[in-house]
Amino acid sequence: MAAVALRARLNTIVRLLEGGGGVLKLLFSLCIGLILVSQATSAQTPSAASTADRHHPFVEHAERRYRQYLASESQGDTAAYKQVRTRQAYETTMEQLKKLGKAESDLGPMLQRVASMRSDVSRLTFVHCDGRARVARLLYEREGVGGKGPTLEFAAFMIHWEDGAWRIGWVGQSSGPATRASGEKRTADELLGDPRLALD
């Protein structure tokens, strides 16, 4: 609605300028176009936030980017994978490929092999998003039952603002008995202690 109202006001201004020179109108139209594009971009890329609300616009956007990441792996789509990951994450993947003695053309099949090991966060309970200006960390958990009793799984991923888009960084997960041998309940502290999941 705001965009419609803005366009209406701009059309009124344009009509007032109709008597002016062509160059003036062209410059004015160009400026207005840039403003509208900027507004549309802002609407599509919400700022990072700290929230426990899974329906927050930023959380929904981050999860959408994560689903794109999972899809790129499961399909072995190397171009889409490169687009959705941070430069560091992509370069780390390529380094691992080289260490395995594989060629760059082997990236697609490798992504498909590891895809099944990733946590589908849509099936987990959202816990919290910790956001900063250009980075955020999203945490999830899921309770289950194993052969030896209750289990607890945690998953987290980093998302960074890079080259005009939110891109997936490090992805981590941990699981095990819901209660440790010491009698303490398993928490996400062990997973979040990984420096690759640090916000600072």
Image: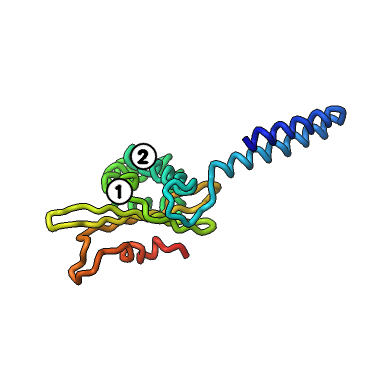
- Residue at 52% x, 46% y: name it: 165
Q: Residue furthest left?
A: 147
- Residue at 27% x, 55% y: name it: 153
Image colouring: rainbow
Please give left or right for residue 2 compared with residue 93 in the image: right
Instruction: Pick the residue in front: 144 or 134.
Output: 144
Q: Position of residue 59 (x, y in %)?
A: 45, 48
Q: Where is residue 11 in the image (x, y as percent from the top left)?
A: 75, 30
Q: Split into 4 quadrants, where in the image is the N terminus?
A: top right
What residue is shown with label 2?
71
Q: Are marks 2 and 1 in contact (CB under 8 Å)?
A: no
Identified by mark 1, the residue type is: Arg
Instruction: State how far apart marks 2 and 1 are (Cα).
Output: 11 Å
What residue is shown with label 1?
118
Q: Can residue 82 be seen in this view?
A: no
Q: Where is residue 12 in the image (x, y as percent from the top left)?
A: 77, 31
SS state under label 1: loop
Q: Residue furthest bottom?
A: 182
Q: In which quarter of the image is residue 148?
A: bottom left
